[in-house]
Amino acid sequence: MVLLAITNANYELVYVNFGMNGRISDGVVVVVVVVVVVVVVVVVVVVIVVVLVVPVAAALVVEAVVVVVVVVVVVVVVVVVVVVVVVVVVVVVVALVEKDALVVVV
């Protein structure tokens, strides 16, 4: 996702490009959709991993340590993804509210 926010001399937001041509409202909608999609994908992946990996590990009589490690890794990945999403959203909101002269987020 690419955000390009440009203001005029009066710091009024005049152009926003979220990887596509569109008005500010379109850009905000795109950000919301991206965040929702990312959250849904993360939830689905976590559910699949928990449903598939844990029973298989238990069926193979794998030590409890391995199961714990898998769960910890999944949790860490989810936390990292959520943090990245939150950071992107915060930067976008700040760019729209503060109306910086030029804000580029990749």
Image (spheres, grey):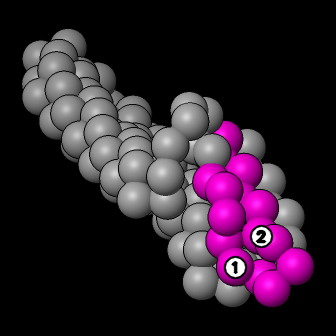
Asked if disc 2 and disc 1 are in contact, CB closer than 8 Å, the reply is yes
Q: Quadrant of residue 65?
A: top left
Residue visible at 56% across and 36% down in the picture? 21
- Label 1's element? loop
Image quadrant occupied by the N terminus? top right
- Mark 2 is surrounded, within 10 Å at the Cα level, by few (under 14), some (14 to 19) or many (20 or more) other residues, namely some
Res. 10 visible in picture: yes
Inspect the magenta stretch and tell me whether residue 15 lies in it.
yes
Point out which mark residue 12 bears: 1
**Span shown in magenta:** 1-16
Residue 47 screen position, x and y as percent: 17, 36
The three-letter amino acid code for the residue at tag 1 is Glu
Q: Is residue 97 left or right of residue 51?
A: right
- Marks 2 and 1, how far apart at CA: 5 Å
Residue 37 screen position, x and y as percent: 30, 39
Res. 31 visible in picture: no
**Is 84 above or below relative to 62?**
below
Point out which mark residue 7 bears: 2
Residue visible at 40% across and 59% down in the picture? 25
- Label 2's element? strand
Q: Quadrant of residue 19?
A: top right
Q: Observer-nearest residue: 55 or 89?
A: 89
The three-letter amino acid code for the residue at tag 2 is Thr
Residue 39 screen position, x and y as percent: 31, 47
**Is 31 above or below relative to 13?**
above
**Is 42 above or below relative to 58?**
below
Residue 96 screen position, x and y as percent: 60, 74
Q: Is residue 95 left or right of residue 32?
A: right
Inspect the magenta stretch and tell me whether residue 7 lies in it.
yes
Q: Is residue 95 left or right of residue 83?
A: right
